[in-house]
Amino acid sequence: MRSVERRRKTVIGASESSDGDTGLPKYVYLFEEGNASMRDLLGGKGAGLAEMTRLGLPVPPGFTITTKACNAYSRSGRFPPGLWKQVEEGMASIEAKTGKVLGDPANPLLVSVRSGAKFSMPGMMDSILNLGLNDVTVHALAALTKDERFVWDAYRRLLAMFGRIVKNIDGNKFGAVLERYKEQTPGKKDTDLTTDMLREIVAEFRSLYRSEVGEDFPQSPKEQLREAIAAVFRSWNGKRAVDYRTFNKIPHDLGTAANVQAMVFGNMGDDSGTGVAFTRNPSTGAKELYGEYLPNAQGEDVVAGIRTPMKIVELKESHPDLYVEFARAADVLERHYRDLQDIEFTIERGKLWVLQTRSGKRSARAAVKVAVDMATEGIISKQEGVLRVEPIHVVHLLLPQFDDRAKAAARREGRYLAKGLNASPGAASGYAAFDPDEAETMGRDEKKPAILVRVETSPDDVHGILHSKGVLTARGGATSHAAVVTRGLGIPCVTGCESILVDYDAGEFRVGDKVIRRGDFVSIDGSTGEVFEGRIPTLEPDFRKETDLQTLLEWADGERVLEVWANADYPRDAERAREFGAQGIGLDRTEHMFMETDRLDVVHEMILAAPEYRRVAAEIRALRQEMVSAREDKKPALAKRLSLLEPVLENLSRRYLGSLEKLEGLQREDFLGILRVMQGLPVIIRLIDPPLHEFLPKYETLLVHVTKLTLARGDPDVLVRTARSEEDQAFLAEVRSAGGGDLARGIEVLLPKKQRLLEAVAASRESNPMLGLRGCRLGIMFPEITEMQVRAIFEAACRLTREGIDVKPEVMIPLAGHANELRILREALEAEAKKVMEREGVQVAYKFGTMIEIPRAALTADEIARHAEFFSFGTNDLTQTTFGYSRDDAEGKFLLDYVKQGILPFNPFQVLDREGVGQLMRVCVQRGRKVRKDLEVGICGEHGGDPESIEFCHELGLNYVSCSPFRVPVARLAAAHAKLRHEIERTEDR
Ligand code: PEP
Ligand code: MG
């Protein structure tokens, strides 16, 4: 695997760990002695300076004191033996290269001492500049540079830095003096201070130093240097640094290196300056030098924003030679490091010095473009290009995002409200709606952006969600209804935002003393979980226009082993999935179609009649059997009973089987649509899964309605008098409309209907519905429902096959826990499928398989595999059943606290729990494939779109991952990462 990025394992340079002359450890490395692989010893900055020196770039000469020296100092509070001598030798080397001497009264050398640990800890440790200035060299330098102002400015900077960092003088004391002088200038800026003022400031700083420390600022440059090195070492154990390491999990025993380097100055006149530049545009990725240059200034002036810098391209006009030289250095660095570089440089009197380079931070767009361009230019391989782009970059490119600056402004303006769970990524701004009907009207009819705000959502809210730009809920977690539905639709969603108090009646939510009312603007960031008051502009995505991303994903497709399928219920979702590159449908949740408003009445009728139908049919069967062997004198009674029951059954059959027939027609259309869109690719259609009462109104609501209707029989107006909330008003309207405008009549019409419903709901109520009559259990208890679904699937498949369309239906049975469940269902359903194919005279290639959602199914996978041609891990349920956590409640109640307290490392409903759930999956794959070698195994739980979980699926050798259409591009990349990373690991292990 030649072309894939490998971690470099360069051998450490010549004299590795001891000083040749003394035999003492080698603590000092000249820049030319080190290289990029020596980060442990020289820190990131030291290794970088060494590497740049080796490349022949103009780096001010210097040396690095190792992290080992720092650790020795930390242990004893003293420089270890031999260190100072090596520092002096290092200084001699710098002096020889620059022709200047530390403390020389004629031609003095100034140096900096900068910290630099193995891992970047920006701003956490200390650095001291301009060391070597004293009352003598200040004059020498002034004479040499003919720039007195610059020299006194450098001296005052040294005094303040040294006082603050080495002697712990409160920096504000120096700042106050400086402010006093700045106040006296017209512009009130550092640059407005005159030479005389700077001279006076130096005098004041020196007396401040004396009064605070009890002695004079050291005039000996060597003493300055020694103290500065010690202070940099001490800053490793400063509070800021320790806290930072603890937070970022950086070990405390690494130590920092100290880099001693000749100073170069960008503030020595108009032929000097300082700048920061990227080798490519970090925002768009365009191949152009991008950055800023500030003439006559030092590095810190750019950061401080003292003056507006010029664009780096302007340097081309003002100093064409320097620009060309810098561009060449930038090119060398980019080609050497094979990545976009962020370079700091200084120009001192027309001479370019490169001070630092590192991989540049970049936007998602730039990450993709730079990876594709660099691979196309041959700087990196395609595989490296694929690895350079993070899944999160893809997420960002394909979802509306808040404009970062606008979001920061909203925060500054105090519009940040709360933070919940980042349930479905993307950003949205819109009018707050607290009712799904209202959101639907707003979004569909008024064409206004709506944010649906609910305590939590249920299937009753779906029509509102469909027409909203975003959803915000106070309760619920990563696999709550709101989260799953919005992810499927690609709508941003924040769930479990417990600090918002939603009041439906008032049509508002509160956070502390802030109130957001119906119609107020609210903005949610589903990628971070943040909620803001007011509008924040968003940037809209378009996959078809993302040509670089498409190229990158094609490269990823060429690498990955895992296929990527999509969870999609409707043809339009399937179309989107194909556009995003899905290779099949891994989960079509057929019950979602039952929820559609035009079908709900038929579904209700079917559910209400089903139990009674089964009971009466069973009784008639038993009676008929009894008749056969009954004594003659008993027969008339039996016949009478039968004659009473038969019309009842006929009626029930009309309602139950009649409803199923209607549903069969509708489902056939559903399957025709999705199979047609997915022609040539597999489509896994899952048979009905949720408990039936999920399709019925809530028990509590029905109970209230029946009670009210009963009470109102004698006094219909009581309904009007007591209608306070919106729900009451809606109920009142329902009663009126049932009575054709007449309340009393409405009550009489509605009451028996609601009573029947209440009885049916009460009869089907379960204490633990998620562990109850659902999944394959439903198909066993009510075979007519799943048989109807299978007929619809095969009727659709036969019809399309006749049209010449290649269809690959796979029928999936949910929630099996015992092989017998599967055997019974499969036998019945496959017989039904065969009947349809025989009737239609068409053969369709199909598979029957099951979901693995119960630990027992995973453990007995060998038994299960005898009756299944494929497995699909339903890791939402498998996580629920393995942990014993209710997926609907846990996140709101304790799970997020568990994560906060570190009891769980992450939310197992978002990222697969490899040790527990993962172990079951591993066992399942092994046992299943032992029985059936070609067993197709995939995953369709929410984890199928999570990059870390995808990596694990790759390890397990699954055939595919299936996720919401919007996550398909991310999954394509993550699957390629998984494969490439494993290859790299294997190569490195060898
Ligand atoms: C699952 O359990 O992982 C699954 C995909 O099914 P559902 O979420 O519909 O229960
Ligand atoms: Mg499930």
Image (spheres, grey):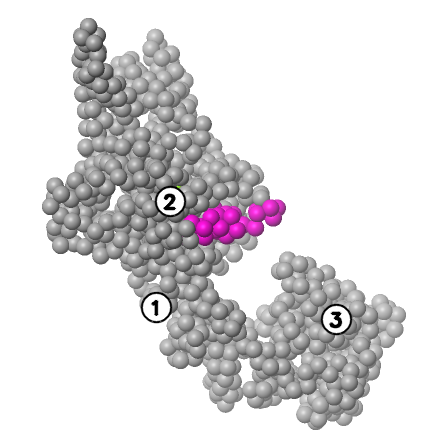
Q: Amino acid at mark 3?
A: Asn
Q: What secondary structure is marked by label 1?
A: helix
Residue 863's mark? 2
Q: Residue at x 63, y 84 (%)?
A: 13
Residue bearing the label numbered 3 = 71
- For the question of whether residue 620 can be seen, the reply is no
In-image side of 217 versus 531 (left or right): right
Q: Amino acid at mark 2?
A: Glu
Q: What secondary structure is marked by label 2?
A: helix
Q: Nearer the viewer, mark 1 or mark 3?
A: 1
Number of residues whose C-alpha sits closer than 10 Å to that of mark 1, classed few (under 14), some (14–19) or many (20 or more) = few
Q: Nearer the viewer, mark 1 or mark 2?
A: 2
Instruction: Note whether 485 is above or below 960 in the view shown.
Output: above
Q: Nearer the viewer, residue 355 or 865?
A: 865
Q: Position of residue 592 (x, y in %)?
A: 31, 40
Q: Earlier in the sequence, mark 1 or mark 2?
A: 1
Number of residues whose C-alpha sits closer than 10 Å to that of mark 2, classed few (under 14), some (14–19) or many (20 or more) = some
The quarter of the image that holds ligand 1 is top left
Q: Earlier in the sequence, mark 3 or mark 2?
A: 3
**Label 3 C-beta lies within 8 Å of the nearest ligand 1 atom:** no
Q: Amino acid at mark 1?
A: Gly
In-image side of 497 versus 244 (left or right): left
Q: Position of residue 190 (x, y in %)?
A: 66, 72
Magenta residues? 899-925
Instruction: Note whether 836 is above or below 952 in the view shown.
Output: above
Q: Nearer the viewer, mark 3 or mark 2?
A: 2
Q: Residue at x 38, y 14 (%)?
A: 718
In-image side of 967 versus 328 (left or right): left
Residue bearing the label numbered 1 = 558
**Is residue 906 a member of the stretch shown in magenta?**
yes
